[in-house]
Amino acid sequence: MKILILGAGQVGSTVAENLVGEANDITIVDSDGDKLIQLQDRLDLRTVTGNAAHPSTLEQAGIADTDMLLAVTQSDEVNLVACKLAASLYNTPTRIARIRTTDYLKREALFSTENFCVDFSICPEQILTEYITKLIEFPEALQVLEFAGGKVSLVAVRAFEGGPLVGKPLSFLRTHMPQIDTRVAAIFRQDRAIIPEGSTVVHVNDEIFFIAASDNIRRVLKEMRRMDKPSKRVMIVGGGNIGRRLAKALENDYNVKIIEFNKKVCQKLAGELTNTLVLNGDGTDEKLMQQENVKEVDLFCALTNDDENNIMSALLAKQGGARKVLSLINRSAYVDLVQGGKIDIALSPAYVTIGSLLAYVRQGDVVEVHSLRRGAAEALELVVHGDRESSKVVGRRIAEIDLPKGATIGALVRGEEVVMGHHDTVIEAEDHVIVFVTEKKMVKKVEKLFQVSLGFF
């Protein structure tokens, strides 16, 4: 597939990094030539320096025969104009735009073919807000991801000393939770993926990904590890787009404080937020933390644009007694350094966002994609088509399907029914199948497996 990416920021460069190794022809455009040189040094792609909203720049980048345009620059207006040009002048088949401004997002008619011709808009800040909100709802979890319109959830938890599963084989799950159907999709032990089998024994600090009907998630969490007390007090550092959105989403159900260094931003926040305490100050000020009783905070979120400040304020909050701390970190190298240490959750905005884009790039009928473990693994929701003759999966038990190494079928949704993916489960046409892939390089093989053979047509 020929893909043109506009914007070499965190989202654009991360998308390029994920797609370039999958036999895609990638070109990336940005006005910052130095940024493009750095990208070209480490990735096999083409770069063009220029304004992404100028037809001459788009033509130089090969818009004429591009299959997909991803307009993810920092400017909503540039992204909208680029999509309009791509549709009107070059008939580009698929056009996706990053849109941050709420005023645009709430006017869906703007994206229609009569206006800016945007097939799909993504708002990274909104995706992050929803992601963090799920972690607040389930404080025991490291990750909570939804499939099939919210019917199925994939949840990551860390096994703790004395937990009910530690030292026991996974087959114990059926005995321990006879009333709840759930499956372990994967286990990561010291960053190494372990394909779960009934005889696999759980170790302390294992990162366990389990899948279940969303209605059962709370019960499963309760059985799999001690239930943390519900989050009530949330402290946010950073009143930018993400911090403001999160405070607005939480303020009616939680006790929320937000710390922002810029006085003008504080005034704006105070005008917008009706039930949040807005504080003007520095998130790395230890004295301020103590004054605001950080030791009573259930979840501390460091959400500024500065990675170092976020790491420092999260560490100070943890040292000051905050129960759980989350830090927004743009640089992937930093994420790997701090994840699993004193900082409970290190969140990469680009990797949280990328799943929304990957669903459009994946071949076959892919409905949902979630990028896991900073892009090393993926979970996909695929719709199955065809019959036993034209498909390699329809009418077959899971045990009969030749899944690529590192791939497991966690669950499937048939109409309104959620069915766990056990070895004797038979897959039917139009099922929504959730597949967990621990090795990114195997994703293409999974897509191919689920595609209908050409003879079907």
Image (tube, rainbow, N blue to C red):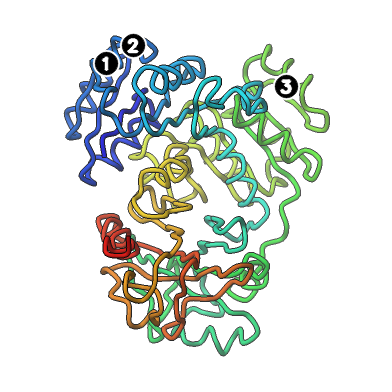
If the image is split into quadrants, where does the C terminus sit?
A: bottom left
Q: Which of the pair 74/1 is nearer the observer? A: 1
Q: Marks 2/3: CA distance?
A: 38 Å
Say which amino acid is labelled 2: Pro
- Depth order, front residue of 191/36: 36
Circles 2, 1 touching at the beta carbon (< 8 Å): yes
At horizontal 51% and vertical 87% (from top left) the residue drawn is 172
Q: Tag on residue 59?
A: 1
Q: How many marks?
A: 3
Q: Residue at x 67, y 28 (%)?
A: 106
| Dot 1: element | helix
Q: Can residue 331 be seen in this snapshot?
A: yes
Whole-percent x, y for residue 58 in the image:
30, 16
Q: Amino acid at mark 3?
A: Leu
Side of 241 relative to 364 (left or right) = right
**Secondary structure of the residue carrying numbered label 2:** helix
Q: Which residue carries the number 2 mark?
A: 55
Mark 2–mark 1 Cα distance, whole angstroms, equals 6 Å
